[in-house]
Amino acid sequence: MIIKNINLETVCGITSKLPENDKPEIAFAGKSNVGKSSLINALMNRKSFARISATPGKTQTINFYNINDALYLVDLPGYGYAKVSQQEKEKWGKMIERYLHSSKQLRAVFLLIDIRHEPSANDKMMYDWVVSQGYNPIIIATKQDKLKRSQIDKHVKMLRQGLKLVPGTRIIPFSSVTKQGRDEIWELVETELLD
Ligand code: GDP
């Protein structure tokens, strides 16, 4: 994808009306600090367009980035941030649920998981939940530059087993440092998810 223009077109807070976009949407979910902003910046070829959080989980919004007037990258709020109250977490759960149900343009959900560690209880819950909402998320295994090349296959297997992925689910190792995986993600989006 050649990025010609990007625009943070809509920012939804908890009570905001969700936009009714007429272009395909691709959503990104993951626990805070997993590298979601860094991934979105890498996909957009920008250094710091999407917020890279110094204080994880602080800004809780759904952000719609218009790419070339052709599609939207949708940044869902990071989950698993301990300092957010239970009540707040539930509100956000409902907001994301509302988005997943109401969007007419959502083509795929990418779920980001840190490649280094066993998936957390929150990661498993999020995966099962997205599946229960009728989507089969594509897994992005983030921060792959932190592993030796020889460890990657083993860790991909660990994620597959830990999350009990539906057979055939794709896992794409990614690094925002080396940009490994970036082209593969765009290719998948362009060849399989856009009209
Ligand atoms: P978010 O909270 O999920 O949006 O995560 P951020 O993109 O803000 O990243 C959280 C932290 O992880 C920051 O310090 C990033 O620099 C770091 N980070 C993100 N992606 C990578 C990666 O691919 N490799 C490495 N080594 N660090 C990363």
Image (cartoon, rainbow, N blue to C red):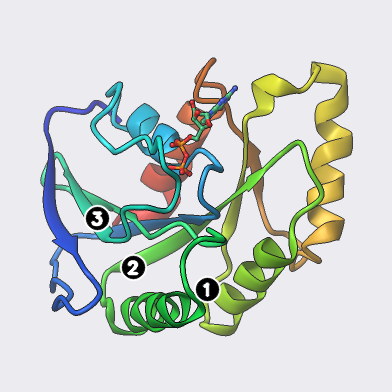
Label whose residue precedes the other's in the sequence (2 or 1)? 2
Give amino acid for label 1. Tyr
Q: Are marks 3 and 2 in contact (CB under 8 Å)?
A: no
Q: Are marks 2 and 1 in contact (CB under 8 Å)?
A: yes
Q: Are marks 1 and 3 in contact (CB under 8 Å)?
A: no
Answer few, some or many: residues within 10 Å of disc 1's Cα (few below 14, many 20 plus, some between 14 and 19): some
Label whose residue precedes the other's in the sequence (3 or 2)? 3
Q: Is residue 158 left or right of residue 26?
A: right
Q: Residue at x 37, y 43 (%)?
A: 190
Asked if residue 14 is positioned above or below residue 48 in the image, the reply reads: below
Asked if residue 55 is positioned above or below residue 125 in the image, the reply reads: above
Quarter of the figure that contains the N terminus: top left
Q: Position of residue 5 (x, y in %)?
A: 11, 32
Measured Cα–Cα span from mark 3 to mark 2: 14 Å
Badge number at residue 63: 3
Quarter of the figure that contains the C terminus: bottom left
Give amino acid for label 3. Asn
| Numbered disc in front, either 3 or 2 | 3
Q: Is residue 52 left or right of residue 109?
A: left
Q: Residue at x 73, y 59 (%)?
A: 168
Q: Position of residue 176 (x, y in %)?
A: 50, 25
For the image, the number of numbered tags is: 3
| 16 or 195: nearer the viewer | 16
| 88 or 151: nearer the viewer | 88
Residue position for label 1: 135
